[in-house]
Image (tube, grey):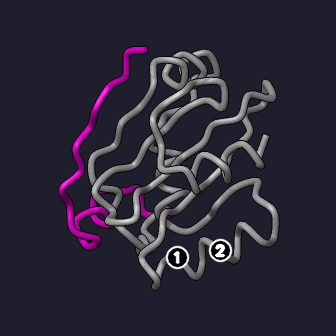
């Protein structure tokens, strides 16, 4: 499967200055390189929804449609250095997952049906969200 890669090497302050004023809330972490699957690009294009809308939500700690347990795990992961997971549902019902690695070097954006080689604990968490 083809994916696109966007590398984000911005500081939190730079990110805030580049956003529209209503979105200038500090981000809680940096995404590293953002890798987006072709399926996600197609789903977002069909809805005319920019990727940045969901990415900003993820970076600000709006984890989307997760269980309370997963939401709390993400909150702890911000300080413990574990992976971060968000799940968003488009108006069509299509889910989009965002996963930021433990070391914050990369963020993967994918559909649940797309298979990527992920760390085992993340794969289990993603499958539990379906």
Residue positioned 60% across, 46% down in the render: 123
Indicate which disc residue 14 carries: none
Is residue 12 one of those drawn in magenta?
yes
Q: Determine whether, in the image, residue 23 is placed left or right of residue 69.
A: left
Foreground pick, 55 / 50:
55
- Asked if the residue at tag 1 contacts the one at tag 2, i.e. Cβ–Cβ closer than 8 Å, the answer is yes
Task: Determine the secondary structure under disc 1.
Answer: helix
Quadrant of the rendered image containing residue 31: bottom left
The residue most toward the left is: 9
Q: Residue at x 79, y 24 (%)?
A: 92
Magenta-tinted stretch: 1-22
Q: Quadrant of residue 19?
A: bottom left
Coordinates of residue 17 in the picture (x, y in percent): 28, 64
- Position of residue 90 relative to residue 58, above or below, is above
Residue visible at 71% across and 34% down? 95
The single residue placed furthest to the front in the displayed view is: 120
Of residues 24 and 101, the one drawn nearer to the viewer in this rendering: 101
How packed is label 2: few (under 14 Cα within 10 Å), some, or many (20 or more)? some
- For residue 77, the mark is 1
Q: Position of residue 7 (x, y in %)?
A: 22, 44
Question: How busy is the neighbourhood of tag 1: few (under 14 within 10 Å), some, or many (20 plus)?
Answer: some
The residue sitting at 42% across, 76% down in the picture is 81
Q: Which residue is mark 2?
A: 73
Label 2, label 1: how many angstroms apart (C-alpha)?
A: 6 Å
């Amino acid at each position: 499967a083809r994916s696109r890669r966007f590398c984000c090497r911005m500081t939190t302050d730079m990110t805030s200055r580049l956003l529209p004023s209503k979105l200038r809330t500090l981000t809680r972490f940096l995404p590293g390189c953002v890798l987006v699957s072709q399926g996600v690009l197609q789903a977002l294009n069909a809805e005319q929804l920019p990727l940045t809308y969901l990415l900003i939500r993820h970076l600000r700690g709006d984890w989307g449609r997760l269980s309370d347990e997963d939401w709390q795990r993400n909150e702890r992961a911000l300080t413990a250095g574990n992976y971060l997971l968000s799940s968003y549902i488009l108006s069509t019902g299509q889910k989009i997952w965002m996963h930021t690695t433990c070391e914050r070097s990369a963020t993967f954006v994918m559909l649940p049906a797309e298979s990527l080689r992920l760390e085992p604990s993340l794969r289990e968490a993603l499958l539990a969200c379906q």
